[in-house]
Amino acid sequence: MLARDIMNKKVLSISPDHSVSHAARTMLEARISGLPVSDDRGRLIGMLSEGDLLRRAELGLAAWDGTGRAGAKPEAFIKGHSWRVGDVMTQPVVTVDEDVPLGRVAELMAAKRIKRIPVMRGEEMVGIITRSDILRTIAASGPDVVAAGDEAVRRAVLARLCSDLGLDRGSIDVTIEHGNVNLWGEVNSETLREAARVAAETISGAGGVRNRLRIVGN
């Protein structure tokens, strides 16, 4: 699945010359926690999020005495007091191309600690992906579907164990008994043993999973 497959194509954006209070009202009315900021040519130049508004003077958290001491820097004063979105927004913007795999989008969100990523086609913003979009994708997903029959399930489970977990085909085996998947062989850790169980459970048609894998040395 790619970024373009789940992105929201109707993107609400705001001008850097809009007021911070207008931006806050817009986010509340649209029930969103962030806005892309675009210039008068439609180019994406920043992002304004709830996080950018947490140290505003209106909240009594942005006092500055002009000394430039740690915690009271001019940059913080600007972000806390300016009425312009352009002064408060976050730059540069983390973006992804529309053909980027969804897994990479999720990795960026986790690594950058951000809740939304604009989706680009060249220099044009064509959509946006939020954490909620990722969650909806997870909620709608199900186990992999494989052909019916014990042997088909057995081969699918073996393939998953070897390809995803890197287990040695010579050290493991899978059998099917009364619709249940039995995992046999040896692994080198409890974590890998549990990962094997999870991998088997992702295969549609696999009934109960009996994890008979042994940990080497135990």
Image (spheres, rainbow, N blue to C red):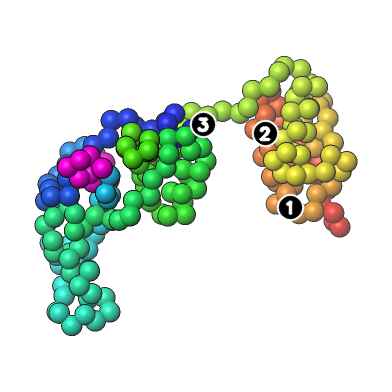
For the record, the magenta segment spans 32-43
Amino acid type, mark 1: Glu
**Neighbours of disc 2 within 10 Å: few (<14), some (14-19), many (20+):** some
Q: Which residue is mark 3?
A: 1
Q: Secondary structure at mark 3?
A: loop
Q: Quadrant of residue 71?
A: bottom left
Q: Which residue is mark 2?
A: 201
The image shows residue 74 at horizontal and vertical percentages of 20, 72
**Neighbours of disc 3 within 10 Å: few (<14), some (14-19), many (20+):** few
Q: Secondary structure at mark 2?
A: helix
Q: Which residue is mark 1?
A: 190
Q: CA distance from mark 2 to mark 1?
A: 17 Å
Task: Tell me which numbered mark, 2 or 3, is placed earlier along the sequence.
Answer: 3
Camera-near label (2 vs 3) is: 3
| Residue 98 vertical position relative to residue 151 in the rendered view, above or below | below
The image shows residue 80 at horizontal and vertical percentages of 18, 64
The image shows residue 30 at horizontal and vertical percentages of 21, 37
Task: Tell me which numbered mark, 2 or 1, is placed earlier along the sequence.
Answer: 1
Q: Secondary structure at mark 1?
A: helix
Viewer-closest of 183 and 89: 89
What residue sits 68% from the left and 38% below the top? 199
Task: Tell me which numbered mark, 3 or 1, is placed earlier along the sequence.
Answer: 3
What residue sits 84% from the left and 47% below the top? 186
Q: How many marks?
A: 3
What residue sits 19% from the left and 54% below the top? 86
Mark 3–mark 1 contact, CB under 8 Å? no
